[in-house]
Image (cartoon, rainbow, N blue to C red):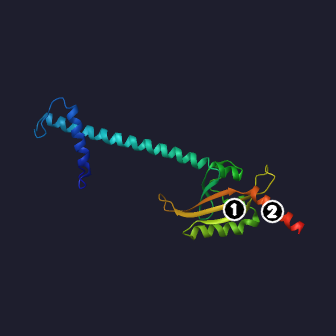
Amino acid sequence: MINYLNPDAQLRLEAQQRLLHKNRWGVPPDEVDPRRLVHELQVHQIELEIQNEELTHTLTEVNALRAKYLDLYDFAPVGYFTLDTKGNIVELNLRAARMLGQERKLLAGRPLREFFDPQALPRLDAFLTTAEFSKDEVFAEALPSLRSKSMLMPMYVNAQARAFVDPQSGQKLIRLVLMDVSALKIATDDVVRIITHSA
């Protein structure tokens, strides 16, 4: 039974029970002599072994979760960003770097607005400001962003963002997801043009 007033009591009890299986000298628990000291040291050693087993197990679980998170984050089909409240890139996944047409390590600290069509900047700024002060997620559709020079078509993205406070730094940041909807936007525009032209 766990003693909630003394959480180490459970650990000590478990260590003493394990020691019974290891005890070669059969030291009575109330005898005060060198053998008693050896007994105490053995109990303490087993307490440390138990704590080490628990830490090793926890570390294994943490590493597995970290690997899973990194896989989901980096290889997601959408661009994930963490921005500061000025709109500068703090962190991003591989897909986001591909969307911006540059290596990830070159993008940290740069303003996201550098990668958007100048005509879209008022919408982008309003969107990020709304995200910063809203308690809910905010959305923007078909924001035109700049493609790298190797891309011939323009790129349009749907955006979803939410503010949060980083527990380590206490700094307010914005999580942003960008989804490339260029093909859908261009196809929709073509259909509208055809309908307008035929009317």
Q: Which residue is mark 2?
A: 189
Above or below for 83 versus 71: below
Q: Residues within 10 Å of mark 2 (few under 14, many from 20)?
A: few
Residue 108 location (% of width, % of height): 62, 53
Q: Quadrant of the C terminus?
A: bottom right
For numbered disc 1, what is the local secondary structure?
helix
Percent across and percent down for residue 183 are 76, 55
Q: Would you say 192 lies left or right of 175 here?
A: right
Residue at image position (76%, 60%) is 185
User: Which residue appears farthest toward the top when viewing the image?
Assistant: 24
From the top left corner, tell me how far across and down residue 68 is, in percent: 53, 45
Q: Is residue 129 above or below residue 111?
A: below
In the image, what residue type sits under mark 1? Arg
Label placed on residue 6: none
Residue depth check, mark 1 versus mark 2: number of the one nearer the observer: 2
In the rendered image, residue 7, in percent from the top left (x then y), is placed at: 26, 51
- Res. 191 image quadrant: bottom right
Residue at x 67% of width, y 65% of height: 140
Residue pointed to by mark 1: 113
3D distance between C-alphas at marks 1 and 2: 24 Å
Task: Tell me the crowding category of disc 1: few under 14, some 14 to 19, or many 20 or more residues within 10 angstroms, Cα based.
Answer: some
Under circle 2, the secondary element is: helix
Asked if the residues shown at circle 1 and circle 2 are in contact, with their CB atoms under 8 angstroms apart, the answer is: no
> Looking at the image, is 87 positioned above or below residue 27?
below
Q: Quadrant of residue 52?
A: top left
**Res. 146 in view:** no
Amino acid tagged 2: Asp
